Amino acid sequence: MAHRTPPPPRICPACDGFASVAVALGGRDRNGHLRTITAHCPACHLTRRNREGARA
């Protein structure tokens, strides 16, 4: 009989596993670099998972 593997942890439905992203603000600075900010998922707090019993 085949052994069943446990299911992977649930991915956060708010960020779909991408808990931290860089967002381009548009335009470039004086040195020619693209201006970006980092945005973090407020639902999973960078864990990339939905906590058991809690809704994200």
Image (cartoon, rainbow, N blue to C red):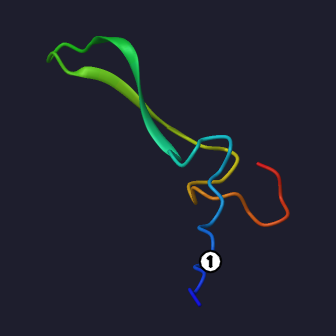
Image coordinates of residue 9 in percent, x first then y, are 62, 66
**Does residue 51 appear to the left or right of 45 in the view shown?**
right
Whether 45 is drawn above or below 8: the answer is: above
2 and 47: which one is in front? 2
The residue drawn where x is 32% and y is 21% is: 35
Whether 28 is drawn above or below 22: the answer is: above
Residue furthest toward the top? 27
Image coordinates of residue 19 in percent, x first then y, are 53, 47
Image quadrant where one finds the N terminus: bottom right
**Does residue 23 appear to the left or right of 41 in the view shown?**
left
Residue 40 falls in image quadrant: top right
Residue 49 falls in image quadrant: bottom right
3 and 48: which one is in front? 3
Asked which secondary structure carries label 1, the reply is loop
Residue furthest toward the front? 1
**Does residue 19 appear to the left or right of 30 in the view shown?**
right
Residue furthest toward the left? 31
The residue drawn where x is 14% and y is 18% is: 31
Pointer 1 residue:
6
36 and 55: which one is in front? 55
Q: Residues within 10 Å of mark 1 (few under 14, many from 20)?
A: few
The residue drawn where x is 57% and y is 87% is: 3
Residue furthest toward the right? 53
In the rendered structure, which amino acid carries the disc numbered 1?
Pro
| Total marks placed | 1
Whether 11 is drawn above or below 24: the answer is: below
Image coordinates of residue 22 in percent, x first then y, are 40, 33
Image coordinates of residue 52 in percent, x first then y, are 78, 67
The residue drawn where x is 63% and y is 70% is: 7
**Does residue 35 appear to the left or right of 10 in the view shown?**
left
Whether 29 is drawn above or below 48: the answer is: above
